[in-house]
Amino acid sequence: MLRILKHLLRGKTINGKQALRDFGVYRLSAVIHNLRKKGFQIETKIIQRTGDSYGVYKLINAPQF
């Protein structure tokens, strides 16, 4: 989860395929859910291509600790 958070904090987006390939995370949606519970505002954009759809996540705002 920390590596994905660092990726998002750099202003980058992430999707499930990228999470699996680059970070070995199979359930990206669970990681995003946990980050949201900790106060991170993450936007989900649904991309539809040739009958398939997937989410792309982007960090909008991070909580102040």
Image (cartoon, rainbow, N blue to C red):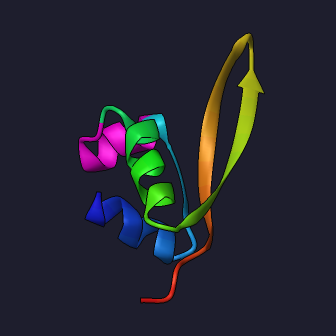
* Residue at 27% across, 49% down: 23
Is residue 55 found inside the magenta-colored segment of the image? Answer: no
For image coordinates 62% across by 29% down, the residue present is 54
Considering depth in this image, is 16 or 35 the residue closer to the camera?
A: 35
Q: Which residues are magenta?
A: 17-25
Q: Is residue 2 left or right of residue 38?
A: left
Spot occupied by residue 2 in the image (x, y as percentages of width and height): 28, 65
Residue 14's spot in the image, x, y percent?
51, 51
- Residue 58 lies, with reference to residue 52, above or below; the image says below
**Residue reaching furthest to the bottom:** 65
Residue 54 against residue 3 in the figure, above or below: above
Q: Position of residue 58 (x, y in %)?
A: 61, 59
Q: Nearer the viewer, residue 9 or 50?
A: 9
Left or right: 22, with 53 as reference point: left
- Quadrant that contains the N terminus: bottom left
Q: Quadrant of residue 46?
A: top right
Residue 51: image x %, image y %? Answer: 73, 10
Up-down: is 33 above or below 50?
Answer: below
Which residue is farthest left? 24
Question: Which of the image's four quarters has the C terminus?
Answer: bottom left
**Residue at point 44%, 34% (across, down):** 17
Q: Does residue 22 belong to the magenta stretch? A: yes
